[in-house]
Image (cartoon, rainbow, N blue to C red):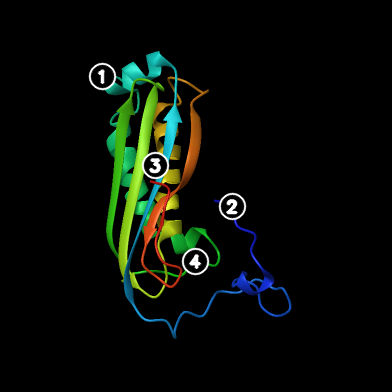
Amino acid sequence: MSQNPSSESLTHLDAQGQAQMVDVSAKGQTVRTAIAVGRVRMLPETFTAIQSGNAPKGDVLGTARLAGIMAAKQTANLIPLCHPLPIHKVEVKITPDAELPGYQIQAEVKIKAETGVEMEALTAVSIAALTLYDMAKALEKSIQIEAIYLLQKTGGKSGDYSLL
């Protein structure tokens, strides 16, 4: 799973070692997707309150889902060297998991462009998780955001990738 990048593969560095935005203008547009996941763990009482709709700030899950979608569209404004992308699809799913207790978050992003959408999917999950925390922090300050990672990607020069 872990790879050791060679200096030639560090495309965000120029010949002097300075950060740069990669020139993707010579690349062809292809359909690309990315799926990222994460989870939010909390006390059983907090989980029960959210599930029953008794959180002080209102619709915790709906707000977190919308925040994740909005975040994917803003990734280039948040991550310095990301390209602004013409996103065609963002889907954020927040699934209750009584075993945690808490929620599993999954974001899928799809585009047709010259570069991938891994960062958009990861950003969607991250912001959905942070919003869930914000919406429920009045109930519990010790909510934990865990295990955010890329689950799968398709398209592009590097090919497909999957942990499935």
The residue lying at 43 percent from left, 31 percent from top is 40
Q: Which numbered disc flags the more N-terminal residue, 2 or 3?
A: 2
In the displayed structure, 85 sits above or below 54; it is: below
- Estimate how packed mark 3 is, as few (under 14), some (14 to 19) or many (20 or more) residues with alpha carbons within 10 Å: many
Q: Mark 1 points at which residue?
A: 52
- Estimate how packed mark 2 is, as few (under 14), some (14 to 19) or many (20 or more) residues with alpha carbons within 10 Å: few
Tell me where residue 138 appears, x and y as whole percent: 44, 23
Tell me where residue 81 appears, x and y as whole percent: 54, 67
Q: Name the residue under label 3.
A: 128
Say which element carries label 2: loop
Q: Is residue 131 left or right of residue 8?
A: left
Cβ atoms under marks 2 and 3 closer than 8 Å = no
Tell me where residue 60 appears, x and y as whole percent: 32, 31
In the picture, the disc for residue 2 is: 2
Q: 21 or 112: which is nearer to us?
A: 112
The type of residue carrying mark 4 is: Cys
Q: 10 or 39: which is nearer to us?
A: 10
The type of residue carrying mark 1 is: Ser
In whole angstroms, how far apart are the C-alphas of marks 2 and 4?
Answer: 22 Å
Q: Name the residue under label 4.
A: 82
